[in-house]
Image (spheres, rainbow, N blue to C red):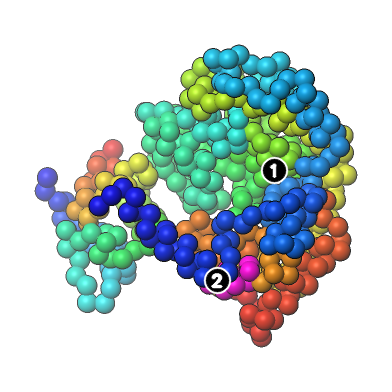
Amino acid sequence: MATNPEILSQLFDILKPFTKEGQRLREETKLVAELGLDSLQVMQVLLKIEDHFDISIPLNNLPTIQTVQELVHEIETLVKV
Amino acid sequence: MSLFEKFHRIQQIRQELLKTGVNPFHVTVEKVLSPTEAMINGQPTILVGTNNYLGLTFHPDCIKAGQNALAQEGTGTTGSRMANGSFLSHFELERAIAEFYELPHAIVFSTGYQANLGVLSALAGPGDVILLDGDSHASIYDGCRLGGAEIIRFKHNDVTDLEKRLRRLGEQSQKTLIVVEGIYSMLGDRAPLAEIVAIKKQFGATLVVDEAHSLGVLGPNGRGLVEEVGVEKEVDCIVGTFSKSLGSTGGFAVSYHPEFELIRYTSRPYIFTASSCPSVVATTKAALNIIQTHPQLREKLWDNANQLYEGLQKAGYLLGAEVGPIIAAMIPTKEMALSMWQGLLEQGIYVNLMIPPATPNGESLLRCSVSAAHTAEQLTHIGKTFSHLKEQYLPSTSVA
């Protein structure tokens, strides 16, 4: 499944403040393992994403979202709904 | 790698805690002396972290009712209500709770945890949506997961965020269960219930309120936040526990919906567990009667809550915003919170240590739960000890 470039670009902008110095975001970047986000930061990021795209990401779906790419696909699905 | 290796990290944390002298999550209460005192580490200790809000655990009426039930009905029911049958006392307790709330239907569960599991999993299943407050208790999260509904969090006590998320759901908002708590257990703050009820009605959603910490505490008759706000007939279901203000164990749910009784046939936490033992049912019923006939207990609880809140505030602690029986002092780091918790215990005061990730916003808390049974002297001693600890650990700073 191709990654929606528009959503990807907006997502990179949202995630940028949460990256470490010199860290480059890629589609394959792992959100928790590579960005080193704690549970509180994960929730902060999610709130920003939800408000930006006007969606609600169900908690049930979170275990399957590990990479930026998977997050883009989730957003794309919810935006379509 | 064995399945048990995942516990190594926990073992490491446990060892680190033990090196400090005591494990705050494994305290042994050696002997209970009264609703507000016990022997811990060999010394008399004031209990101000036990949620015994009305101090009923040693009330003579409750003790007598429990002893009679033990003698007449035995030590246990030895099975579930569905398979083994209900004792008459189970139905009598349900009737007493329904009458207390002036609602037609009540179901009793074996624990408060199971009450949330049983009700939430039965009400919202696959194809439904649950909107829960982000600071909800673990039993609410677990109950939501058990049912298989889609689970969405809204920002704690943020009515605008709740409304926004209901709007995003479109027509599905009518198949949405909103879950909030009367008083939240960590910081002691209350849900903005009048606004939440208005939004629930606007979108045609269903609302469950967990009154675990507000039963017997709020409202002119102790019926919780729903009574205090005057929305008892507009909340679809109220859930609560017997293990706090009623000094017993068990949980319940009440509702005006005629279909509510059918939860008994669909709720796995109701069906597949042993029912409450007779003595527990009897003490709960006696305590419920005391709540209704002794409003002065509630007044005393609030006097005590005001005294302790004022004492800790004067000492310079940053506290949860609302005065109430849960008073949480926010401490800058978890290491400092642990040291101060140990300092309190050494001075004969037991409070709850709350650290991330169990706490909202990553706070570290020293959480007190006030009882109507606390004496003014006990509360003064607690306030003074907190004050001394602040001088010791945080001289010349405000804890914030």
Q: Chain of mark 1?
A: B
Q: Is residue B196 left or right of residue B389?
A: left
| Above or below B47: residue B242 | above
Could you say which is closer to the camera, residue A51 or residue B273? B273
Residue under label 2: B20
* Callouts 2 and 1 in the same chain: yes
Residue drawn 47% across the image and 30% down it:
B121
Q: Is residue B304 found inside the magenta-colored segment of the image?
A: no
Image point (56%, 20%), residue name: B80
Region of the chain picked out in magenta, as a range? B335-342
Q: Is residue B364 left or right of residue B153?
A: right
Give the quarter of the figure containing the C terminus of chain B. Answer: bottom right
Of pointers 2 and 1, the one earlier in the residue sequence: 2
The answer to whether residue A13 of the structure is visible from this angle is no
Count residues near mark 1 (Cα–Cα under 10 Å), then give few for <14, some for 14-19, many for 20+: many
Identify the amino acid type marked 1.
Answer: Lys
